[in-house]
Image: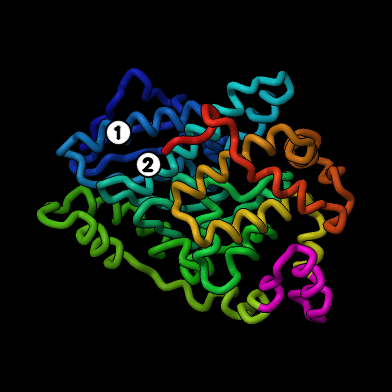
Amino acid sequence: MSTVSNSSENTAEAPVLFSQDGPVGRILLNRPRALNALDLVMVDMMMAQLKSWEQDETVKVVVIEGAGEKAFCAGGDIRGLYDARQVDDEEVLDAFYRREYHLNHYIATYPKPYIALMDGITMGGGVGVSIHGRFRVVTERTLFAMPETGIGFFPDVGGGYFLPRCPGRIGMYLGLTGARIKAADCLYAGLATHGAQSTELDGIKDALASAAWDGDGFAIAEDILKNHETPFGVAPLSEVRHEVDHCFAGDSVVAIFEALQNAASAFGTETLEALSGKSPTALCVSFEQIRQGGDMSLAEVLKMEYRLSQRMVCKPDLFEGVRAVIIDKDHAPKWQHGDIGQVDPREVAEYFEMLPEDKELNL
């Protein structure tokens, strides 16, 4: 039988619900009408509960999932950040990214098995609370993306760490284009660890709850997930891998554009069109973020991304992108720069400069 912790906060309207089912600590992101978008309240609630469960010997494993059938978590609450910027609420803009990145890092270092059931839309901030866990389960309903360049931002929540660790240049491709991929591609790219049909998820949770949990908890979780695993066939990304690796191997975004123009293929044409709608500044910053992140630890990447976030929220492209996609929905952003060739490398370098010591992210 499930027991609910923090009962004073766990009403039907609470944005995150916590419960314990025997040895299983369960997190339910509970904003289905908002596709379980992550806000600061949810970040703080999750951090507090995970810390409590870390000290609770009766909790052997943590499972996180999303309410409803559409989304695990479609990203951060961009509308809330937009509203904060409109009234120059710098405290909110600082706090959200600072505490979100702390949560991402804490999940990555969590001493107990952390299993994310990435059933449905999993994007942006939703990736941050799933991909850093040891176990990431995708289903036939999973739709994964890091679409931030389309709103004038960069693939954060550790994107500078996990994207360059995808095979070949797949991470650079996903980070710049915001391409949406499904289960087979998530597994191929190493973004997910296991695949299962959505109908198997209840069986996974039941097996976790009934397991004895004697011995290595990570090995026990692995065995249970393997017993419910479903193959998802050939990954579409594998069929264009050679083009991805060739076109995204350039030493600049301009070089990538040129390679795509010269590709003379459907992939080249479609990808060039996708990139042409993104913020030129965001593309250049994201390229450098992913390039540098390949040689950095997760903590180093998150510190770098925090610097980028605090620069981005002061620039026009992010809020023009949110206006065009979320607020007015005209999908016609007017970016700071008209094309990629107008972005000065010195401007990009400024995004990466150290913040004042008292403003840096400490992990």
Q: What x and y, as percent, mark residue 244?
A: 66, 74
Mark 2 burial class by Cα count in 10 Å: few <14, some 14-19, many 20+: some
Asked if residue 247 is among those painted magenta in the image, a careful observer would answer yes
Instruction: Assess whether mark 1 and mark 2 are in contact (beta carbons under 8 angstroms).
Output: yes
Q: Which residues are magenta?
A: 246-269
Q: Quadrant of residue 170?
A: bottom right
Residue 354 seen by the camera: yes
Quadrant containing the C terminus in the rendered view:
top left
Q: Is residue 145 left or right of residue 319?
A: left
Q: Residue furthest right?
A: 338
In what element is the residue under mark 2?
helix
Report how far apart the C-alphas of labels 2 and 1 lie in the structure: 9 Å
Mark 1 highlights which residue?
A: 51
**Closer to the camera, 270 or 261?**
261
In the picture shown, does residue 330 fall above or below 169? Answer: above
Q: Specify the color scheme.
A: rainbow
Quickly name the residue at label 2: 106
